[in-house]
Image (spheres, rainbow, N blue to C red):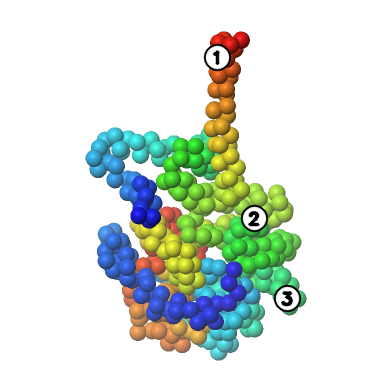
Amino acid sequence: MKTQSLKKRDSELAQAKRQLEILSNGIFQDGELPTFAEKIAENGHFPLRPRRLEILQINVGYMCNQVCEHCHVDAGPDRKEIMTRETMQQCLDVIKRTGAHTLDLTGGAPEMNPDFRWFVEEAAKAGISDFIVRSNLTIIRANKKYYDLPEFFKKYNIHVVSSMPHWTRGKTDKQRGDGVFDASIEALKMLNAVGYGMPDSPLKLDLVYNPSGAFLPGDQAGLQAHFKKALLEDFGIQFHDLFAITNLPISRFLDYLIASDNYEDYMYALVEAYNPAAVQNVMCTNTLSVSWDGWLYDCDFNQMLGLGVASPVKHISEYQEDLLQDRKIVISQHCYGCTAGAGSSCQGAVV
Amino acid sequence: MADQSYYDPKDLRKFGKITDWQEDLGSKFFEYYNSVFQEGALTAREKSLIALAVAHTERCPYCIDAYTKDGLQRGITKEEMMEAVHVGAAIQSGASLVHGVQMMNKVNKLDG
């Protein structure tokens, strides 16, 4: 288990350019495997275009209380990038005039941004009623100042989407760090106690599963059934849905794939599992991603690879929906991760 | 050559190519194979564990790789996987030992 981000370790993979070189060369450059652009062209999906904007996904900072093995953000306690209130205000200005109905807050641990609660309150005033917060759960138990987060989430009817790699302690702690499983269980109990995740409760609590190693997620419904049974029987915990998400070959997961000699096999697995039906529903087609410093991306993964939107509008401060709608979505080989099997993205299976 | 073997893990990717030289029978096999592993009276998860146990008793490295990965994808734990391998091993050793009765019968007949 690493305890520092790639950036802190001065790893060459902390550089987006280096990651893109790895993804573009080798098996893709020599034609052993088709590039993602070639693959989607077979079904007439190239270039990939956005549909109507529905979700504004805002990354409010890379700071996190965990250093998960496969974090695509390379987040951790040593990351200091954090969205300022000024940039949040620019996001709020856009929220008021955009067609997006959902605000999806992510990080790092979004709750660690000192203006997180202010932002939620202001966004609620601006008319957003559909909030998603991607919580790592342990933040709720990390410090007393976060203990009331379940009540705060409830007050704004926030849809809590939480990572939970497995229903067993061993696999969860291996991927996310020692003690994460127990802290997550405590946090889930706190969320259940205020009504989150209970059957028929409007307080939505969904879990996110991503594989602990170099393999793709299996059937989402089957995994959900097992998670529900195990968490209820072992801990009395309930939740609504499980999103099975494929690990994308970028950042710390790419580092792991290369270090464990699994990179080529994993890319083969992604390409073999390519599902054309997933292409039209991937998250980049209805979502816009905003980085901590206000730059615009087609998705959170492109954000981490430094692949900004292909539009004259590059920053939230110059937002123009019509110009953005006219763009082509920027793709690379990592996009195979969102179109494998039942599809992935941040909302789990898409077909 | 230390890095050469009769088995190459990459050959598993080429399994589908067996239809190249006998498309009709190969296709029928894959149709049957895929049907077997659908959810049925047994769950796909249970079938995966059975396949893993059989992979070991058949000593098929490709099958072991394939159903280890399949098990991980289904969230099957390593403890469950090892138990399945023991089930296969128990049946395999039992199959040897139960023939001990034949040996005993023969001894009793010849030398009783």
Circles 3 and 2: CB distance less than 8 Å?
Answer: no
Q: Name the residue nearer the viewer: A139 or B27.
A: B27
Looking at the rendering, which quadrant does residue A113 occupy? bottom right
Q: Tell me the quadrant of the picture where the C terminus of chain A can be found.
A: bottom left
Residue A106 lies, in percent from the top left, at: 55, 73
| Residue A98 seen in the figure | no
Could you give the CA–CA distance between mark 1 and mark 3, rounded to whole angstroms?
75 Å
Q: Secondary structure at mark 1?
A: helix
Residue at the spot 62% in from the left edge and 61% down from the top edge: A172
**Is there a contact, CB below 8 Å, between mark 1 and mark 2?**
no
Q: Is residue B65 above or below residue A152?
A: above
Q: Which residue is mark 1?
A: B106
Residue at label 2? A168
Q: Is residue A53 above or below residue B50?
A: below
Left or right: A350 in relation to A164: left
**Residue A241 placement (x, y as % from top left):** 58, 56
In the image, A281: left or right of A242? left
The residues bearing labels 1 and 2 have C-alpha atoms spaced at a distance of 52 Å
The amino acid type, in three-letter code, at marker 1 is Lys
Mark 1 or mark 2: which is in front? 1
Task: Characterize the local packing of mark 3: few (<14), some (14-19) or many (20 or more) Cα atoms within 10 angstroms.
Answer: few
